[in-house]
Image (spheres, coloured by chain):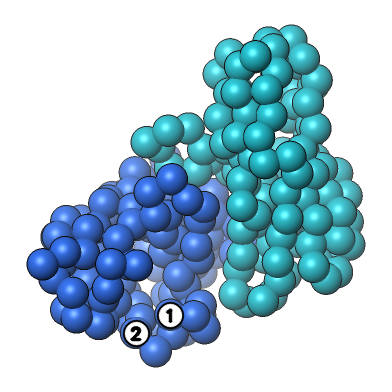
Chain colours: A blue, B cyan
């Protein structure tokens, strides 16, 4: 059973860069059958899709965040990562990593990690 | 972006009830719709994809239907563990978008 685990700082200062890593276990991150994505959720609010990455390095980002987002994947470490630059209070949220079917439906999720943007 | 509007936003029901949640898309998304269940403090859980395909391990009391712009999630007989928030998601075009959620609470 594939499992995903987010890791990274829980507190980031305004204008700095948020960096998170998702470690995949129980399944191959190199599989051609899946994509790897990030979704976030501010407290008490709905879900926002950030983007996704394929083993080839191909990415798709939400245009609302595209100018600040970078995703990468390191198959040797079974990890994929999210970087979000120039953060503000509005970026405070629980960040989830997930495994996607090719259709972009997320069938396995990490438990989520809270990132707070504050000075 | 494709907008998804769920109704109702809040639903109060009793165990054993049959409930239906609707998701309307701002444009035709064919059958490219999924439903998720989320409990407080937990990650979303995939219930249904391609509008009506039940994800492995999900109880058969959950069902989905629809195509184009109107979709429904039905729970045939509510169980105590079903009280949660439900989200629809469209995967027809980027960016992927979600509905605002329907909170299902115990009456």
Give whichever of B100, A40 is nearer the camera: B100
| Mark 1 crowdedness (10 Å alpha carbons): few <14, some 14-19, many ≥20 | some
Reply above or below: A103 against B66: below
Location of the N terminus of chain B by quadrant is: bottom right
Check disc 1 and report its element: helix, strand or loop: loop
Q: What is the residue that sits farthest to the bottom in this orientation?
A: A67
Chain of the residue where label 1 is placed in the rendered structure: A
Image coordinates of residue A50 in percent, x first then y, are: 45, 70
Residue at screen point 43% across, 45% down = A44
Q: Is residue B48 visible?
A: yes
* Count of numbered circles in the view: 2
Labelled pair 1, 2 in contact (Cβ < 8 Å) = yes
Numbered circle sitting on residue B86: none
Q: Say whether residue A85 is left or right of residue B34.
A: left
Residue at figure coordinates x 86%, y 61% from the top left: B69
The front one of A99 and B15 is B15
Measured in 3D between alpha carbons, the distance from the residue under mark 1 to the one under mark 2, in whole angstroms, is: 6 Å
Answer with the quarter of the image where residue B96 lies.
bottom right
Q: Which residue is mark 2?
A: A68
Please tell me which residue lies in front, B106 or B52.
B106
The location of residue A42, given as percent across then percent down, is 39, 55
Q: Which residue is at a point 67% across and 50% down the rendered structure image?
A: B88
Residue A59 spot, x, y in % from top left: 46, 81
| Chain letter, disc 2 residue | A
What secondary structure is found at the residue carrying circle 2? loop
Relative to B81, does residue A44 appear above or below in the rendering?
below
Between A101 and B82, which is closer to the camera in this rendering? B82
Residue visible at 59% across and 75% down in the picture: B95
Label drawn at residue A65: 1
Residue A89 place in picture, x, y as percent: 28, 67
In the rendered image, residues at marks 1 and 2 fall on the same chain:
yes
């Amino acid at each position: 059973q594939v499992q995903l685990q987010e890791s990274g700082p829980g507190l980031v200062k305004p204008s700095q860069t948020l960096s998170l890593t998702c470690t995949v276990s129980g399944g191959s991150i190199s599989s051609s059958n899946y994509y790897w994505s990030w979704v976030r959720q501010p407290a008490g609010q709905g879900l926002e899709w950030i983007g996704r990455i394929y083993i080839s390095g191909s990415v798709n980002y939400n245009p609302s965040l595209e100018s600040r987002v970078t995703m990468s994947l390191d198959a040797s470490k079974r990890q994929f990562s999210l970087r979000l630059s120039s953060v503000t209070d509005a970026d405070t949220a629980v960040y989830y990593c997930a495994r996607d079917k090719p259709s972009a439906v997320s069938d396995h999720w990490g438990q989520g990690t809270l990132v707070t943007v504050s000075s | 972006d494709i907008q998804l509007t769920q109704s109702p936003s809040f639903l109060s029901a009793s165990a054993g009830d049959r409930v239906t949640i609707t998701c309307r898309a701002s444009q035709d998304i064919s059958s490219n719709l999924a439903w998720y269940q989320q409990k407080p403090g937990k990650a979303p859980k995939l219930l249904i994809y391609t509008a009506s395909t039940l994800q492995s391990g999900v109880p058969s009391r959950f069902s989905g239907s629809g195509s184009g712009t109107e979709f429904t999630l039905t729970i045939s007989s509510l169980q105590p563990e079903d009280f949660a928030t439900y989200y629809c998601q469209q995967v027809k075009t980027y960016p992927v978008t979600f509905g605002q959620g329907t909170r299902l609470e115990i009456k």
